[in-house]
Each structure stands twice: as C-alpha cells, then as structure tokens.
Image: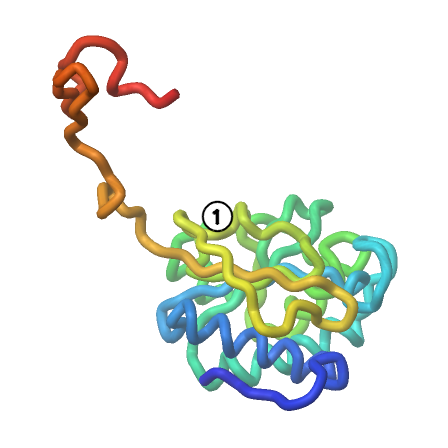
Amino acid sequence: MKLKYEGKASDLSLKEQVKIVLSEVVEIARLGPGKVLVIGTSTSEVAGQHIGTSGALDVANELLQGIEEIRSEVGFAVAFQCCEHLNRALVMERTLLEQLRLTEVAAIPVPKAGGSMGSAAYLSFSSPCLAEAIEADAGIDIGETLIGMHLRRVAVPFRPSIRYIGEARVNAAFTRPKLIGGERAVYRLETDSGREIHSNGLNEGNAHLCD
C-alpha cells in the first residue's frame, strides 16, 4: 500500500503529498475495515499562513480527494477534527457514529467555525454528523492542530517520510493496546542489603509508589 515517489516532495501536488503520508500510516497502523483514522488539518498552515487565519476550501477539497482515494481502496473509516470553536468535534458519516455509539453534538461546521477541512468534509459525506469525541486507531495532524484527545491509548508517534504537506508540518500516530507488564517490568527487586521487595506492596516502606 505504501506509495513511493521520486524527486522532491515539494514538487508534488497537495493531493499526492497527502496520499503518500496516508499510505505510510495505513501500513504502520494496519488500517482497514473496522479501523478509524482521525485527521486534523489547518489549511491556513498548508497555505503558509498562521493557523486559523487563512482557511481555504480549495486546499481542503484537494486534500480530501487524496484521502478519499486511499480510504476507498483500503476501507477504513475517517473522522475529521473541527477547530476549537466547535470544541474539536469530529465530522463523520452517521453510520460510524451509530456503529460506535458516539455522542452526537449539534452544529454544522463552516470555515469560520469548524474550519475549512471540517466544512469540506461535512459537505462531502452522504449523511454527515458531528461527534463529541472518539478513540481512533491512528491519526494524521497536518499543521499541528493537536489530535491527541481523539486517539485511543496508547499512542505511538510516527514520522512519515514527507514531513510537510504544502507548508504545514505533518505528524502522525498509530495506537497499540496497553502493555500490562512486559519485558521491562520488574516484579521483584533485591536491595544492596539483601532485602527483597515484591510488587504486591506488602513490604516495608513505599516500594509500591512511584517517585
């Protein structure tokens, strides 16, 4: 699924740039049917301006085209994060909201209250709605909009080969289940004096506490 490119990433269209980034996230996160990707985008940053100052629907629509080409091929669901004016609610298809039994909130995102990407996504969906929150399996942040509040624990940072889409810095993450224990976990500790401290917290002192 991972797309390859030659030359400079900056020579590619916005559509091709986002397709490459998304293809890499699909591979590392193993996205497919039943998985959810959250995307946060500042079209202002993509256009080289400060976040929240120069939203552009044409930029949003070009990015959407690239995202949809990959999504339709792989089969994962996507949710688009709105801006802070809508409390970073998420635009998605109603089928996803109902499937995950998410809390719906009432608003229609527009460029000045929701963001250009959220607004464009809302218009592109067949039955759009807004959810208050989600726990997505992976995420892409275009323009450092901060999407962490909508990622499932535990999030693992991922650096795509293309670090900028347009002029916007790109970060991504996939998630993994919580590791309860694991190879680094310590369950028994012997001190210099020969005293053993066990993880059950029944020994002397505060061995069961952190720091």
Across and down, in percent, residue 115 comes to 74, 58
Does residue 26 show up? yes
Q: Is residue 103 left or right of residue 195?
A: right
- Which quarter of the picture shows residue 163? bottom right
Q: Is residue 19 above or below residue 89?
A: below
Q: Residue furthest top?
A: 204
With respect to residue 33, does 184 lie above or below?
Answer: above
Q: Which quadrant is home to the C terminus? A: top left
Amino acid type, label 1: Thr
Tell me the residue at 56%/69% (across/down).
160
x, y percent for residue 107: 66, 52
Quarter holding the N terminus is bottom left
In this picture, residue 104 sits left or right of residue 6: left
| Residue 98, image quadrant | bottom left
Residue wearing tag 1: 103
Point 18% across, 18% down: residue = 201
Is 153 placed left or right of 66 in the picture? left
- At horizontal 61% and vertical 88% (from top left) the residue drawn is 5
Closer to the camera in the image, 96 or 158: 158
| Residue under the image location 48 percent in, 48 percent down | 103
Residue lying at the far front in this picture: please name it. 192
Extreme bottom residue here? 6
Image location of residue 34, percent across then percent down: 36, 69
Q: Secondary structure at mark 1?
A: loop
Task: Identify whether 138 is placed above or below 16.
Answer: above
Where is residue 135 drawn, in percent x and y? 44, 52
When asked about the image quadrant of residue 174, the answer is bottom left
- Viewer-closest of 193 and 89: 193
Query: Exactly how many numbered labels are in the figure?
Result: 1
Q: Is residue 139 visible?
A: no
Structural crowding at the residue carrying mark 1, measured as other residues with C-alpha within 10 Å and reported as few (<14), some (14–19) or many (≥20): few
